[in-house]
Each structure stands twice: as C-alpha cells, then as structure tokens.
Amino acid sequence: MKIGVLGANGFLGRHMLARLARENEVVAICRREVDLGLPVRKADLLDVASLEAAFDGLDCVVNA
C-alpha cells in the first residue's frame, strides 16, 4: 500500500513514518523540503492544488 503522511516532519508524523515504512511504501507530505530519508512531496493545507498533486497515486493519506 502506498501511504502519504501529512505533517510528516512533526513529532507524531516522524514516528508514524517510521512505523508505516516497515510494511508499506510511504511518502512524507510537508510544507517545505526536509530530509526524512524517504520521498517527500511539498504541499500546503491552504492550497488545494498542491494537496491534489501531493495525494496523486496514493492509496490513503494519514493526517498527523
């Protein structure tokens, strides 16, 4: 399953990434470019177009 984690660079998001990456393909979704050791897509909650682009191809999204 391909899962996006929205807010992946926060405290909860980083822990969720680590846990979900054990059994799934995960993508971090953040406002700015960060190095999390996984693919990162940039998106802003106030910009619907950026969210649609970030969610493209994902099976589900977890909001952290």
Image (cartoon, rainbow, N blue to C red):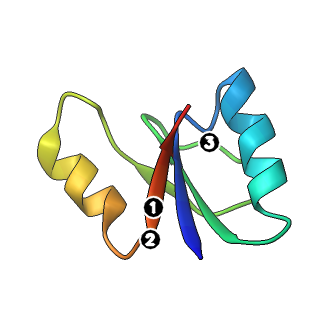
Image quadrant containing the C terminus: top right
Q: Is residue 20 above or below residue 32?
A: below
Whether residue 37 appears in this view of the structure is no
In the image, 1 versus 32, the foreground residue is 1
Are there few (<14), some (14-19), or many (20+) residues within 10 Å of tag 3? some
What is the x, y in percent for residue 3? 55, 63
Q: Which mark is residue 34?
A: 3
**Residue at coordinates 70% horizontally, 61% vertically from top-left?**
38
Splitting the image into 4 quarters, where does residue 13 fall?
top right
Cα distance between the residues tagged 1 and 2 = 4 Å
Horizontal relation, residue 26 to residue 51: left or right? right
Coordinates of residue 20 in the picture (x, y in percent): 75, 57
- The structure residue drawn at horizontal position 64% and vertical position 64%, both measured from the top left corner, is 26
SS of the residue under disc 2: loop
Q: Is residue 50 visible?
A: yes
- Of the image marks 2 and 3, the number of the one nearer the N terminus: 3
The crowding category of the residue bearing disc 2, from other C-alpha atoms within 10 Å (few below 14, some 14 to 19, many at least 20), is few
Residue 31 vertical position relative to residue 49 in the rendered view, above or below:
above
Q: Which residue is mark 1?
A: 60
Q: Amino acid at mark 1?
A: Cys
Callout 3 amino acid: Val
Q: Secondary structure at mark 1?
A: strand
